[in-house]
Amino acid sequence: MIFIFITDLHTGQHGEFAHNIDLRQNFLDTLAAIEEQPYDYLVIGGDLCLFEGNAEVYQWQKEQLDRLAKPYFIIPGNHDDTITLSELFDHLPLVGQAEIYYEVLIDRQTFLFLDTARGMTSDLQKIWLRERLAECQSERVTIFMHHPPALMGVPHMDQRHALKDRREIIEILNLTNIHKDIFCGHYHVQKSVFMDRISIHVTPSLFFQIDQLKEEFAVDHLNIAYNVIELREDLMTTSVHYLQGNLI
Ligand SMILES: [Fe+2]
């Protein structure tokens, strides 16, 4: 079973560029690259919009995604509007305090899609996460969430934009012995952090990548990437593919 994970599209309105980058073209180029290889499911890791949720942007993205004719899942990021997102992508459930979180079972494997669009999760979502993990029948669980639930050793993001309730999330994750593979975006870097029974993988964005050493914001490079996650019976592989080759 192969998932492709893309994140932080930051698509602007028609003709809107940022940092001189044609973000719509970045998205189209990525989808073209993805179509060249086998996969079963696509996951969009949040920050679909440049600054804030926009119905026209979501509609344009939906047209491109529907054209692929493969199932896709979406989680919201801090530059999304969950209500607008759920209106445009009507398979996304709006739960409780306008959050989008849900569970998917495929071949007896559990996949959890979380909502950290407000920089943290609601109490209701934390209760749901605890319950889903407690009832999980598979030996490992794959979680998709926009913000990583831990500091990642990227000073600019760790100090200013980390998930506010990350310690509570880690406490909940540690309540179960199941191995948790967590795929995130938000940080605009490629980085993995490993804890006891928790692996956190941050995938680069489709916008720009952030300098991982500087405390002040600085762009590292503009090479965009997607993550190929393959699950077999007894192992998981993850490999980040850069569209212009691996420059770093
Ligand atoms: Fe982002």
Image: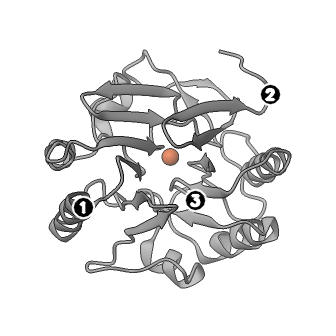
Q: Nearer the viewer, mark 1 or mark 2?
A: 1
Q: Mark 1 to mark 2: distance in Å?
A: 37 Å
Q: Which mark is residue 129?
A: 1
What amino acid is found at the position of numbered circle 2 in the picture?
Gln
Distance, label 2 to label 3, CA atoms, is 22 Å
**Dot 3: what SS?**
loop
Dot 2, crowdedness within 10 Å: few (<14), some or many (≥20)? few
What residue did someone put label 2 on? 244
Q: Position of residue 69 (x, y in %)?
A: 78, 69
- Between residue 215 and residue 108, name the one nearer to us: 108
Give the mark nearest the N terminus, 3 or 1.
3
Relative horizontal placement of residue 23, taking residue 1 as reference (left or right): right
Q: Are marks 2 and 3 in contact (CB under 8 Å)?
A: no
Say few, some or many: other residues with alpha carbon within 10 Å of mark 3 (under 14 / 14 to 19 / 20 or more). Answer: many
Q: Disc number at residue 176?
A: none
159 up-or-down from 126: above or below:
above
Tell me if residue 245 comes above or below residue 206 in the rendering. above
> Given the image, on which type of amino acid does mark 3 rest?
Leu
Residue at position x 60%, y 53% from top? 10
Of residues 246 and 110, which is closer to you in this image? 110
Give the position of the C terminus as an image quadrant. Answer: top right
Q: Amino acid at mark 1?
A: Leu
Instruction: Give SS at disc 2.
Output: loop
What numbered label is drawn on residue 48? 3
Judging depth in this view, the residue of 168 and 142 nearest the camera is: 142
Task: Choose between 217 and 55: the one closer to the eye.
Answer: 55
| Residue 72: percent from left, percent from top | 63, 65
Asked which secondary structure carries label 1, the reply is helix
Question: Is 50 on the left-hand or right-hand side of 38?
Answer: left
Viewer-side label of 2, 3 = 2
For discs 3 and 1, the disc positioned in front in the rendered view: 1
- Side of 221 where 66 appears, left or right: right
